[in-house]
Image: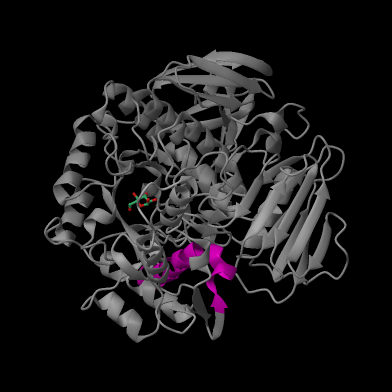
Amino acid sequence: MIKKYVFGQPLETGAAVLEIPASTDTCSLMRLTQSEEGVSLFYRMEKEDVLYGLGEQVRGINKRGFSYISDATDDPIHTEGKHSLYGGHNFLIISRRHKPSFGIFIDNPGKTVFDAGESKLDELRIQTGCDCVIYTVEGESLKEIAKQFRELIGQSYIAPKWAFGYQQSRWGYESADDVREAVSGHHGHGIPLDAVYLDIDYMERYKDFTVDKEKFPDFPEFVSEMKERGVHLVPIIDAGVKIEEGYPVYEEGVRENYFCKDENGNDFVAAVWPGKSLLPDMLNSKAREWFGSKYKWLMDQGIDGFWNDMNEPAIFYSEVHLKKVMDEVISMKDENMGLHEFFHLKGLVEGLSNNPEDYRRFYHNMDGVKIRHDKVHNLYGCYMTKAAGEAFDKIAPDKRTLLFSRSSYIGMHRYGGIWTGDNASWWNHLLLSIQQMPSLNLCGILYAGSDIGGFGCDATQDLLMRWLEFGIFTPLMRNHAAAGTRPQEVYQFENIPDFRNIIRIRYGLLPYIYSEYMKAVFDHEMYFRPLAFDYPFDAHAPYVEDQLLAGESIMIAPVYRQNASGRYVYLPEEMMMVRMKSLEEKHCEVLKAGHHYVDIALNETVFFVKKNHMLPLAVLDDDIRNISGIDKNRYEWVGFAEDKAEYVLYDDDGMSKNYTPKEQWTKVTRSVNELDVTV
Ligand code: GLC
């Protein structure tokens, strides 16, 4: 049951798609109060209560014990003391042991604070703005609550099937030859690859919808050369538009008043990669339509996938703020600066970027209504992605286009996926990415993944290998690294055959991953789930923070610690452990319910099949280059059955929007002795 409570005059964010009449009762689940500062929610937590949700955030799967702030922030240092990352995902489930659990969604694109036991261990306090809609979701189980919420916010985005293959990215592929080298590097070692990303290096002076002709001569020809080699190119699009006379995107936008304005109605100037830039008013429907239409220029050259970036929006500095800071700095004396003067200077300079004051300095024209940016801050990236998604429906209506974004708000999951931004090559960021996945799925974001190997800092061979062993289960499986870091393509390290084996395991698992992804989309379910969602009566499951269910048949328990020779795994029921050194080298063993220490060598992928479940595993040719090499008639069935197991396999052409109707999904049944891979 979903209830809706309306406060003030909320803005239509588009997060919810179901029409629900507003309730007039007093909410019995949490104490809701209204004051001049906004709306507050209070709930006293029982000892056993567990909090799930909040999408892309720091810390664990159970959100208890810290404060999280929905306030999209471009901050690459994702340490556990931070309160905000790139998104605003205000959905939380309060899982209760002795009473029915419930969900709560705060639909307000301004700042929302979730104090989930930081101030007081047993108190959950949520503080949001005066104008908002609050939904409560009650259901019989965690799965039920999640499903109802997902129905409320509408069907998740469907990526083309090739975007489930292995993808390589790097900020620093400076030319077509650099890209060619990355492709050859993979193919030369027999490593399948479906896409290579173009970071800001492909643009002419970092201008959106341009290609640097010197570094990438004859771009359409290059795109088709790559397609012939089986590789899609995926260019980045940034939010800021460079101010440059003669640059049509800038000139058109200025002429039509499509950019955000300052208080006096002048274009608001903020700097990003291209230097001084303007921010398209993504909250204005005309500006959105205009910005979206610009993607066509690249699509006409053969491009069929994009990643939207810097759309919190990130601001290196604003023109006004920089001037203030420079004036103050120039007036300072540079002799023998004392403690206070020095830290003041440091603060001034560091405070230039993504400054909250700047977010109060510009305005949107929301189709006639002037609205200050900070009130709708968390919607900017979401609406940039909506702009692109809606444009794709017109430009290529019958085809799927890959699209994901850095910043997001609930509702964006209908237009694209996300990647989790600028993580680092740290072991605890591998754990963080494991923990973020179910929380994102709960908020509708199914097409998701982290920068495998880590974006910032230098990846080591073992970290990259372990990260890939988790990454083979994430729908978006992309290796990405920052400029200036150690080369991170798998072939840059030793033991390339091991890397090849891991990536081939992904391709072997692809029919299962794709099928589970699509079923999760159509059935409004979670592809990644915390253990307690499938084992609600298990006393230990709610506290397992480093294992996930991935699709209906398997549980994963990735290794995420440096030098670990294995790890402890908790099995809520008897399961079959599958251990793989390669797609061809599998070993199965049944493990009883309970705690186990499992040895997992660096080059081993391990997963656990639930009882009476099975999954398809594609048998691959030795020279498979990309997803098109998977033969639908050559699957092995890996299963753990008492007498028989059943699996519903979803498949389609992977490109068009002619999705297979539910009645035609293939139900496969195998008895114990018909399974190809079992104990
Ligand atoms: C941002 C993105 C990162 C990208 C870089 C350069 O930091 O998050 O993925 O590589 O910008 O475009």
Indicate whether residue 133 is drawn in magenta: no
Whether residue 436 is situated above or below residue 268 in the rendered picture? above
Whether residue 587 is situated above or below residue 158 in the rendered picture? above
* Image location of residue 276, percent across then percent down: 31, 68
The image's colouring method is one colour
In the rendered image, is residue 189 in sight?
A: yes
Which range is magenta? 371-397
Q: Residue furthest front?
A: 335
Q: Main secondary structure of the magenta part?
A: helix
Compare residues 105 and 639 and report the one nearer the observer.
105
Write the residue at 54% across / 65% down.
Answer: 377
Q: Quadrant of residue 27?
A: bottom right
Write the residue at 44% across / 81% down.
Answer: 286
Write the residue at 33% across / 31% down.
Answer: 620
Compare residues 585 and 278 and report the one nearer the observer.
278
Whether residue 645 is situated above or below residue 441 in the rendered picture? above
State left or right for residue 230 relative to residue 669: left
* Image location of residue 316, percent across then percent down: 38, 59
